[in-house]
Amino acid sequence: WARRCVQETGHGKSTLVNSLIAKAGIITANVARETRYLDYREDEKERGITIKSTGISLNFQYDVKDDGALEQFLINLIDSPGHVEFSSEITAALRVTDGALVVVDVVEGVCIQTEMVLK
């Protein structure tokens, strides 16, 4: 399944993606805290925001039946921008996914860009 994180800029999409990448064992928790793993372009690093959608495949093992038998799960994840300036990237990422994970800042709540994307 392909999933995509949807939300405004600066509310934690890339942080969540970094945490999932660390949980999958691709990077350490320290690296997840120190860098934006999927923001590889220089302009993304300089501005501290995601500009281009980037995908990654994550393998997880989980005991679904609580019987000690681990099942394999493959999640194809796309981290895409949250800023309205890059709405074409957001739209393109949503078109190729099976679903979306919406990240909402608990303090600010649902913002205008999030509402537009959800429509």
Image (tube, rainbow, N blue to C red):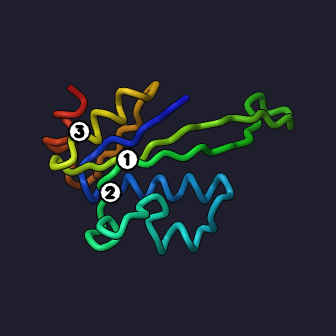
User: In the rendering, which numbered label is found on residue 68?
Assistant: none
Q: Which amino acid, by three-letter code, is at mark 1? A: Ser
Where residue 90 sits, quadrant-wise, is: top left
Residue drawn at x 33%, y 41% is 6
Query: At 60% from the left edge and 59% from the top edge, which residue is drawn?
Result: 22
* Amino acid type of the residue that numbered disc 3 sits on in the rendered structure: Ser
Which numbered disc flags the more N-terminal residue, 2 or 3?
Answer: 2
Write down the residue under mark 2: 50
Q: Nearer the viewer, residue 20 or 52?
A: 52
Residue 53 percent across, percent down from the top left: 37, 47
Q: Residue at x 26, y 69 (%)?
A: 47
Calculate the distance from the C-alpha at mark 2 to the C-alpha at mark 1: 7 Å
Q: Nearer the viewer, residue 87 or 22?
A: 87
To which quarter of the image does residue 67 belong?
top right
Disc 2 marks which amino acid? Thr
Where, by quadrant of the figure, is residue 36 drawn?
bottom left
Q: Is residue 61 above or below residue 105?
A: above
Which disc is residue 53 wearing? 1
17 on left or right of 114: right
Kindly indicate whether the residue at mark 3 contacts the one at mark 2 (C-beta within 8 angstroms): no
- The image's mark for residue 88 is 3
> Which of pointers 3 and 1 lies earlier in the amino acid sequence?
1
Closest to the camera, between mark 2 and mark 3, is 3
Mark 2 in CB contact with mark 1 (< 8 angstroms):
yes
Percent across and percent down for residue 118 are: 24, 29
Left or right of 4, for residue 32: right
Above or below — where is 71 with respect to 12?
above
Circle 2: element type? loop
